[in-house]
Amino acid sequence: MSTGERKVSASLNRSVRGATPRLADLASTPESPRTPLGRSTSYGFGSPGASFRTEDEYVVIEIGSRFVRCGFPGESAPRCTLPFGPDEQRRAGDYRQWDPDYGHQRRKRKRGQEWGQEHELYRMDLSRVDLGLVEDKFERAMREAYNKHFLLDSKPRRILLAMPPRMPHALMSTLLDVLFTGFQAPSITLMSNPVLAAVAAGLRSALVVDIGWAETVVTAICEYREVRERRSVRAGKLLSEEMAKVLNAELDDDADSSAPKADVSFDEAEEVLTRVGWCKQNPRSNRRTVYFPAREAPVLEEFEDAVESPPPTVTVPFPKHTPPTELRVPFVSLAKPAEAALFAPEMTLSEFDDEDLPLHYLMYRTLVQLPVDVRRLCMSRIIITGGVSNLPGLKTRLLKELEALVQIRGWDIVKSYGKASASHEEKFRSQREDAELRRQEGDDMMSASLDPDAPPPAIPAGLQEPEVDIIDTKMTHLAVRNGPPPVSLIGGTIRGVETLGAWAGASLIAQQRIKGIVEIERERYLQHGLQGASREKEVSVVQQRQSMGPGLAKGAGERASWTLGVWA
């Protein structure tokens, strides 16, 4: 190597040693900074260039009657869950919460208010709802979410709004006004909570049982379509009232006769229900089930020789009671509210209204009214969601009660045969016995045929095995090659499926950039409001492709009109 080459090599080595290290080298060093595991990563880092596409950025919002959940797409949980209560509605200058005696005072309901009304954002009956107050509550919650939890810049972002089905138009218009005018959202996509719950469970068809605050909604979904829906007022509100009645009765029994009657507040009843409330299970090995035809509900009777043991008790403190006390409540009594509010076993079926049915009857009647093929898909994909569904033992009890109803009544859509009820029951029992007998005889005849040249015995067509389809067999083998059989191959049995919730389904849909049916543009809404939506009787879930013709005035992805879908 010449002298000039040595000088050039030395200068290159000095420049390399003094150069700034690459980002890959910094990332590989152990002392480089890392993101903590507890901090969630923004969805903008999911794909290259996603953070620069501000027109596609979404904010996911779920609206309930008592809460608002907000977050970003691609995340498994919302950034915030904001409740509505008296503490969130304080005026400026209200410093009662810092009073030392404020936490020991029991709040009383105002005259004319219903149970838990101060903790609600809205209710479906708008005759007693102040929409101006609803607008102020919702706007205050959204400003807290944007300024305290989101920490976003001033760029407008699209909103994916998860809402309950069949919401009144006046209430929808109030909520949309806040999002369009107060937060300058360019567009809002509306999604139904039952469909999102099915998406979060990984299903296309399901029976979604949403046990909410004011009502329970049972929705049958087939291929992302809501094909049947029934409602009942037996939900969290009635459950909380029953818990308050049980606690008041226990406090009155424990207190003196001269003391005033106890009046448990809403916060105390909700805390006890959340912490120690539970639901009874179906009969175990030391119980037998007795069915009464007039009641059509399983009744449990204990065996007389059952081993008796002292019932367990739970100590519940009541610091706001006068005087403060600690009440020892039997653990069995804490299951009475769920029994009375959600199942009502002491009432006959004729005493219920169509909007007051127990939950297992509500699920059964929804399934009975479905077509056979849709019922087969839905009955093996039952999703029980909602705030009350977290009550221990409730999901198992609902599935067992539904299975008992199916065994008693079958899938007969007729409720009562009148004077022919006894003969119908006898006919139904004899048909089942005859079918079982014919099945056994057919098995015996096939096993007794030992001569291969003998003609096969005559088997009824209903007992013959169906022909094997080669294509179905091949697809089944391909599906189960890498794991257990998928849900699509299971049907005809009562089966529950867990879900991550409506917000998780909305987060998944927004991350995948799936275009919804109900998309409301800001300019069109500000011009016409909800009256600008087209009234279509049938709305397809799958978006049709738009061909590029010579007279095309709009872009391929722009719609000429928009519809409200299930909210129309």
Image (tube, rainbow, N blue to C red):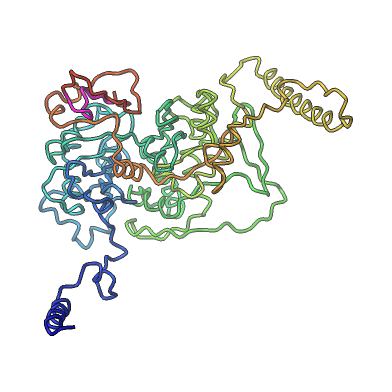
On the image, the x and y values in percent for residue 474 come to: 59, 36
Residue at the bottom extreme, as displayed = 3
Magenta stretch holds residue 556: yes
Residue at the front extreme, as displayed = 2
Give 333 or 326, whichever is nearer the viewer. 333
Rendered-image quadrant of the C terminus: top left
* Residue found at x 62% / y 29%: 469
Magenta stretch holds residue 199: no
Q: How many marks?
A: 0
On the image, the x and y values in percent for residue 352 come to: 48, 27
Does residue 87 sit above or below 472 in this rendering? below
Give 247 or 426, whichever is nearer the viewer. 426
On the image, the x and y values in percent for residue 167 come to: 29, 29
Does residue 265 sit above or below 98 in this rendering? above
Horizontal side of 440 relative to 158 (left or right) equals right
Does residue 389 sit above or below 165 in this rendering? below
Horizontal side of 137 relative to 501 (left or right) equals left
Residue 531 picture quarter: top left
Horizontal side of 485 relative to 202 (left or right) equals right
Residue 11 picture quarter: bottom left
The stretch of residues the image draws in magenta is 554-565
* Residue found at x 42% / y 55%: 275
Rendered-image quadrant of the N terminus: bottom left
Is most of the magenta stretch helix, strand or loop? loop
Does residue 5 sit above or below 525 in this rendering? below
Residue 298 picture quarter: top right
On the image, the x and y values in percent for residue 189 come to: 25, 35
